[in-house]
Amino acid sequence: MTGDFATLTIGVLALQGAFAEHVAALRRLGAEAREVRRPAELEGLDGLIIPGGESTAIGKLLVDFDLLEPLRRLVAGGLPIYGTCAGTILLARDIGGLDQPLLGTMDLQVERNAFGRQLQSFETDLQIHSLGDEPFRAIFIRAPAIRAVGAGVEPLARLDDGTIVAARQGSLLVSCFHPELSGDDRFHRYFLEAVRTAHDEHAKGEPTAVIA
């Protein structure tokens, strides 16, 4: 996958968590990266990344900063959004009945802290066919796991035991791990390719593309 992403403006939700590393990855790939903390900063975005961090804290801040409903409208409008770790939780419709603010727009059942606490963080190589033949070094830190997916969701990566750790649904993409910490920009490039396709089709007045 190749291409110039200079025409794209990607927001990175910057309320809490590992947003700076996402900004750096996007800029390495040539895209314009904008830190988002207020509703006005959502204007004119071609895509958005919701980073890892504390999902409960991010959810509360989405409410406090009046971002929850604007983000839901952007999802409904087809804006490409990529959620990592806590972002996966925030995008999921089902997190086991836990009470916290969610976007709740992706047909996933997600378990928080599925692999244990900080001491149980780990790294592993994943075979992700959408990224090519070379394994992707995935970093899991207090990570969630995707326990079930709806009919419209395509798993992208699994652990050796079959646990789903990355998936896509329409213009939405999630990973339970932190690609921004790996030094491997292929997952961000994959997202930017999808954003660029959606941007180009929108400019032509065509229906919004899905991540493929």
Image (cartoon, rainbow, N blue to C red):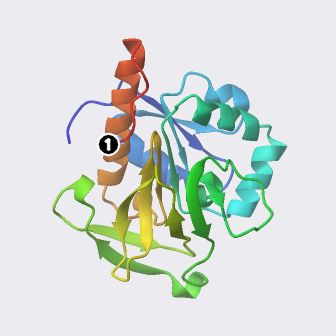
Q: Position of residue 69 (x, y in %)?
A: 75, 36
Q: Closer to the camera, 160 or 31? A: 160
Q: Position of residue 105 (x, y in %)?
A: 62, 46
> Residue shown at 77%/50% (left/top)?
61
Q: Closer to the camera, 130 or 7? A: 130
Amino acid found under the numbered disc labelled 1: Ala
Pick the quarter of the image with the N terminus: top left
Furthest residue toward top: 204
Q: Position of residue 78 (x, y in %)?
A: 52, 31
> Residue shown at 31%/70% (left/top)?
137
Judging by the rendered image, the residue that carries numbered circle 1 is 212
Furthest residue toward right: 64
Corner quadrant of residue 41: top right
The vertical placement of 58 against 76, above or below, is below
Q: Closer to the camera, 164 or 41? A: 164
> Residue shown at 20%/38% (left/top)?
2
Question: For the image shown, how many numbered marks are present on the structure?
Answer: 1
Q: Position of residue 56 (x, y in %)?
A: 74, 62
Residue 52 visible (yes or no)? no
> Residue shown at 74%/41% (left/top)?
68
Characterize the local packing of mark 1: few (<14), some (14-19) or many (20 or more) Cα atoms within 10 angstroms. Answer: some
Q: Closer to the camera, 107 or 156? A: 107
Residue 31 visible (yes or no)? yes
The vertical placement of 66 against 119, above or below, is above
Corner quadrant of residue 58: bottom right
